[in-house]
Amino acid sequence: MNDLFIAPHAKPLNGDEGLIYATWKFMRNPLEGFGPLAYSQGIVSVKQAGIQMHVLTDPEAMNAVLVKNAAKFTKAPIDARILGPATKEGLLSVHGDQWKKQRRAVAPIFRARHMSDLSPLVAEVVDGFKARLGQGKAVELNAAMADLTFDVLSKALLGDPKGLDRDRLKVATRRVVTSAGTLRPDDLIPWPRGTPRPMGPRGYIALRKLKSAADHLIKTRKNDPGDDLVGLLIGAQDPKTGERLSLREQRDNLIGFFIAGHETTALTLTWALYLAAKDPSGQAHIRKEARALGTDNMSFETLDKLPFTRAVIDETMRLFPPAPIINRECQETCEVLGRTINPGDVLLLCPYVMHRREALWDKPHAFDPDRFMRNPELRGKSAPYMPFGAGPRICVGASFAILEAVTGLASLMADFEISVAEDCFPRPLMTVTLRPEGGVKATLTRVAE
Ligand code: HEM
């Protein structure tokens, strides 16, 4: 076995720093605010600012909350605070019966049948990106991948929208993601549910533009929804009751898809390309596999012909889960790993820490995609691997994300070699998603057939 690349890791606390320092670290980068206990035991409980919090880093504990007792938890007030302004009435934010209705109506949009239709769109956008690279170029991966995944998503969602400037929509969405979707120290204050979160004028203006673009689009499609994802969303019906989504629900879901769907996939591709650059033999393996299938043949149906590329994507999301912490608030008493959780307690479920625990993973910080080839069970329900969450609220767009990340990476690697500077070790920084601090400067160079 070649020497494995040891991926950058958010430096945990030593455990003897004291509460004030730990809180300060947590506010700057939550992933650096966890001590050794979070890495050695499945549940750690602390009381902060009068709130009882539990940090969960174990598959059994996570499943107890997300699957077994899912109905006893809601999303935490911090989610409502961050996501509320953009998507208060969308799937990402709603609870109870409203969530059940929306989930039943929206889930069919992401079924395999529709994913097959999306494969050519992914190919078209990736081909356009490759054409712009020409024989090769230096790029900042994070920005380039955010552009690419936005273009895929906007094509998938909107088809060819008349009277809508796609570039302006992209700028507005990016601005909303970077202003509203970026954690700030004041987000960690336990504000009561519903406390508004100031965003700054640029964020407000961008959000207004995004909402009015979404409203306009939904209005113009009223009589002829079309068969792209937005058409499916407008026509979506709860199969149990026949109820449709209200106009507000349609708009907030459309915005929710943009927000939840492009940054997460962009980060997966950014980190995957970074890791490929640091692992030349892995990179060559992806290229060989991609060329054997042929870029024209990459689709939802042929994903199983790219098993190593898929393993690279899984290993990337293990090391750098785009959603590194999932929050919940307890509504009804229950037990997690023998500990009583009471109404009002806040839970921080940390895929990032779980994915890097010594007790759960062999060489947890090493980039070793073969581990998913050797042991496909690592993707199983009780495995310590949950980049898309688990249970009834598991990511509804997961198959879309996998399609885009796997075929996008394979297609890029089929034609280009990627390299980064030897001393490129970006710090994993949790904003809301897990970004490489300062971005990743890479060079993509076309390789001969
Ligand atoms: C690699 C890419 C992605 C990752 C890692 C990811 C991760 C997640 C996670 C962890 C959750 C669960 C959050 C929770 O339980 O609180 C979630 C939910 C969700 N995701 Fe994704 N996601 C990705 C891509 C997408 C895409 C492409 C879309 C849509 C176009 C999407 C739409 C959603 C929505 C609407 C929810 C809320 C589901 C519900 O509450 O019923 N995501 N995602």
Image (cartoon, grey):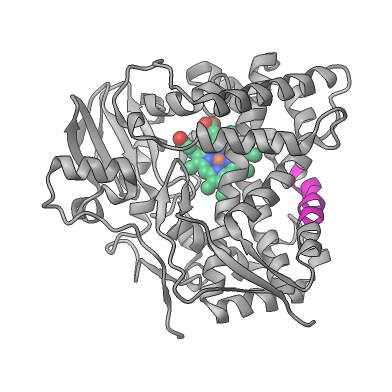
Query: Is residue 305 visible from the viewing direction of this image?
Result: no
Quick check: 78 left or right of 118? Answer: left
**Of all residues shown, which one is farthest toward the bottom?**
1
The total number of labels drawn is: 0
Query: Is residue 138 visible from the viewing direction of this image?
Result: yes
391 or 287: nearer the eye? 287
* Secondary structure predominantly adopted by residues drawn in magenta: helix
Q: Position of residue 214 (x, y in %)?
A: 72, 24
The quadrant of the rendering that contains the C terminus is: bottom right
Q: Position of residue 179 (x, y in %)?
A: 51, 34
259 or 327: nearer the eye? 259
Q: Residue 74 sits in which quadrant? A: top left
- Classify 120 as above or below 102: below
Q: Position of residue 55 (x, y in %)?
A: 27, 41
Q: Position of residue 398 (x, y in %)?
A: 59, 45
Quadrant of the rendered image holding ligand 1: top right
Quick check: 212 left or right of 252? Answer: right
Q: Residue at x 43, y 43 (%)?
A: 431
**Of all residues shown, which one is farthest toward the front?**
201
Q: Residue at x 34, y 71 (%)?
A: 363
121 within the magenta span: yes
133 or 150: nearer the eye? 133
Q: Residue at x 43, y 22 (%)?
A: 197
- Classify 144 as above or below 3: above
Q: Residue at x 84, y 20 (%)?
A: 220
Q: Residue 111 sits in which quadrant? A: top right
Magenta range? 114-125
324 within the magenta span: no
366 or 243: nearer the eye? 366
Quick check: 354 left or right of 303? Answer: left
